[in-house]
């Protein structure tokens, strides 16, 4: 895996570079938001570890411009611990995951591994989390043998959550991707449809797969 570290705290950047090199990652380091953008556009990194507070250009802006420029690398943002607004802004600007500072190196490596596994390749077979499957061709949704009937909107919502399985999606992410027009009724419509969907895909006795991430949004995953 090829990794770009964007971090202006020199000591932290060096520690990360050394640690990740020992884990056999190929690592580049930059300390400025503009350099980060140049590097990201120039090379196919698997993961970009992106700090928020940076000279040159802040991490949110850099992230948005990377996505606008077609960068498909996984982006892991380093945000201030417990700053929900930062995490939401990070996810809305196109980051895949976030990690609050300070963090344990072990957790960073675990998240890098998870991002590496996620992949962006075309999926073969149905989309799946636990025993919940969605066949993109036949539009059939099942939990094991139980066939599930969904409305078109519920289907689009589930499809979006499954395509981003393991990722937290904010209400705005979901509004943008599922509702797909300038909906003006507010983001609580997302909560309403998540409730509808949950009733159908999680009947009593089945593993919970649709998780609420408090203050941020929703995540479809085998574990919370
Ligand atoms: Ca910084």
Image: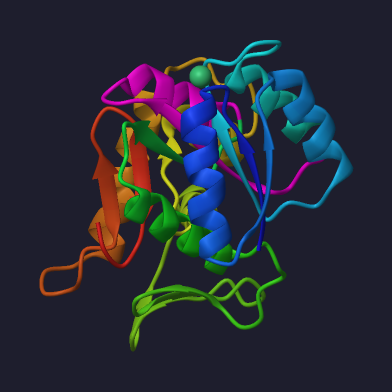
Image location (x, y in percent) of residue 67: 73, 34
Which region shows up in magenta?
70-93
Name the image quarter holding the C terminus: bottom left
Image location (x, y in percent) of residue 202: 23, 64
The residue sitting at 80% across, 52% down in the picture is: 44
Q: Determine which quarter of the picture holds residue 102.
A: top left
Question: How many numbered discs, if any?
Answer: 0
Work out which residue is located at the far bottom of the displayed protein and give it: 145
Q: Determine which quarter of the picture holds residue 131.
A: bottom left
Q: Is residue 83 magenta?
A: yes
The residue sitting at 59% across, 16% down in the picture is: 54
Image location (x, y in percent) of residue 30: 69, 31
Q: Is residue 87 left or right of residue 75?
A: left
Work out which residue is located at the far right of the displayed protein and give it: 42
Name the image quarter holding the N terminus: bottom right
Q: How is the image coloured?
A: rainbow
The residue sitting at 53% across, 50% down in the picture is: 18
Image location (x, y in percent) of residue 38: 84, 30
Q: Is residue 117 magenta?
A: no
In this view, 74 is above or below 147: above
Q: Tell me, yes or no, if residue 210 can be seen here.
A: yes
In this view, 98 is above or below 74: above
Q: Is residue 101 left or right of residue 51?
A: left
Q: Is residue 152 left or right of residue 219?
A: right
Q: Tell me, yes or no, if residue 159 can be seen here.
A: no
Work out which residue is located at the far left of the displayed protein and give it: 205
The residue sitting at 48% across, 64% down in the picture is: 113
Closest to the observer, 209 or 166: 166
Q: Is residue 101 left or right of residue 47?
A: left
């Amino acid at each position: 895996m090829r990794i770009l570290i964007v971090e202006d705290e020199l000591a932290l950047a060096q520690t990360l570079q050394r640690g990740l090199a020992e884990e056999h990652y190929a690592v580049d380091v930059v300390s400025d938001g503009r350099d980060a953008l140049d590097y990201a556009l120039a090379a196919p990194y698997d993961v970009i570890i992106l700090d928020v507070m940076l000279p040159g250009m802040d991490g949110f802006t850099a992230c948005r411009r990377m996505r606008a420029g077609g960068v498909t690398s996984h982006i892991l943002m380093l945000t201030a611990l417990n700053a929900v607004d930062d995490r939401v802004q990070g996810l809305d600007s196109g980051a895949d995951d976030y990690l609050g500072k300070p963090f344990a190196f072990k957790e960073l490596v675990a998240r890098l591994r998870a991002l590496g596994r996620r992949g962006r390749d075309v999926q073969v077979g149905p989309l799946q989390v636990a025993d919940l499957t969605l066949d993109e061709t036949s539009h059939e949704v099942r939990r094991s043998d139980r066939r599930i009937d969904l409305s078109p909107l519920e289907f689009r919502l589930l499809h979006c959550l499954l395509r981003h399985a393991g990722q937290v999606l904010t209400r705005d992410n979901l509004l943008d991707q599922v509702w797909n027009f300038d909906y003006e009724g507010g983001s609580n419509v997302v909560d309403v449809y998540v409730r509808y969907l949950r009733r159908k895909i999680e009947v009593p006795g089945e593993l919970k797969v649709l998780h609420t991430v408090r203050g941020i949004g929703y995540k479809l995953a085998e574990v919370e």
